[in-house]
Amino acid sequence: MIKTEHLFTMPVEVEMPLQMVGQTPIGERRIAKVTGGTFEGPKMKGTILPGGGDWLLLRSDGSLQLDVRVTLQTDDDALIYMTYRGFRHGPAEVMARLNKGEAVDPSEYYFRVAPFFETGAEKYDWLNRIVTVGTGHRLASGPVYEVFQVM
């Protein structure tokens, strides 16, 4: 049995419109610039620094594959590099509503990520050695994640 513990909630702000690279040999490539956001949980909180991004790939099976890299700055000024990969997919009509910026119940689509961390900050060194998973939902301003440490 796998046990998890809530690590943090993380709303992410994304610049619109996305950069539309277009159809490539492996799918439709889109790039989202991360402009900010926050994260807060029982062990850590802070902001997402501008300059990160999500190199999205819309695959031929309709799945959106995420490849995200951001820098977190804790409220006590530690820097943490966070990467995550994941998938978002669902019925075509649900995804169309979501892509228009409509509010869609997260139970209507699949949105999961697997974050990893790197930091040189002693206080947060434990992040370098854990596995985490997250669930997401999409707002017009960007995604919101609930990230959990696998115990």
Image (spheres, helix red, strand yellow):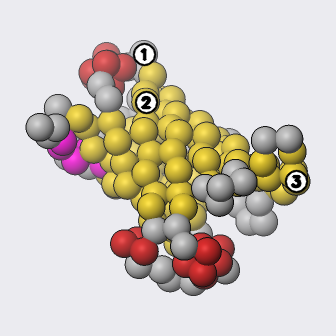
Q: Is residue 125 above or below residue 144?
A: above
Q: In front: 13, or 129?
A: 129
- Kindly tell me whether residue 86 is visible in this rendering: yes
Amino acid on which the number 2 mark rests in the picture: Phe
Task: Determine crowd level at label 1: few under 14, some 14-19, many 20+ residues with C-alpha closer than 10 A.
Answer: few
Q: Is residue 90 above or below residue 65?
A: below
Q: Residue at x 61, y 55 (%)?
A: 63
In magenta stretch: residue 6 = yes
Q: In front: 136, or 46?
A: 136
| SS of the residue under disc 3 | strand
Is 66 placed left or right of 40 in the picture? right
Q: Are marks 1 and 2 in contact (CB under 8 Å)?
A: no
Q: Looking at the rendered structure, which numbered label has been put on residue 116?
A: 2
Q: Residue at x 17, y 32 (%)?
A: 151
Q: Is residue 79 above or below residue 54?
A: above
| SS of the residue under disc 1 | loop
Q: Nearer the viewer, mark 2 or mark 3?
A: 3
Amino acid on which the number 1 mark rests in the picture: Gly
Q: Nearer the viewer, mark 3 or mark 1?
A: 3
On the image, the x and y values in percent for residue 147 come to: 33, 47
Q: In front: 24, or 72?
A: 24
Question: Where is mark 1, residue-wise?
Answer: 120
Main SS, magenta region, reads strand
Quadrant that contains the N terminus: top left
> Which span of residues is magenta-colored?
4-8
Question: Where is mark 3, residue-wise?
Answer: 22
Task: Determine crowd level at label 2: few under 14, some 14-19, many 20+ residues with C-alpha closer than 10 A.
Answer: some
Sequence order check: which comes first, mark 3 or mark 1? 3
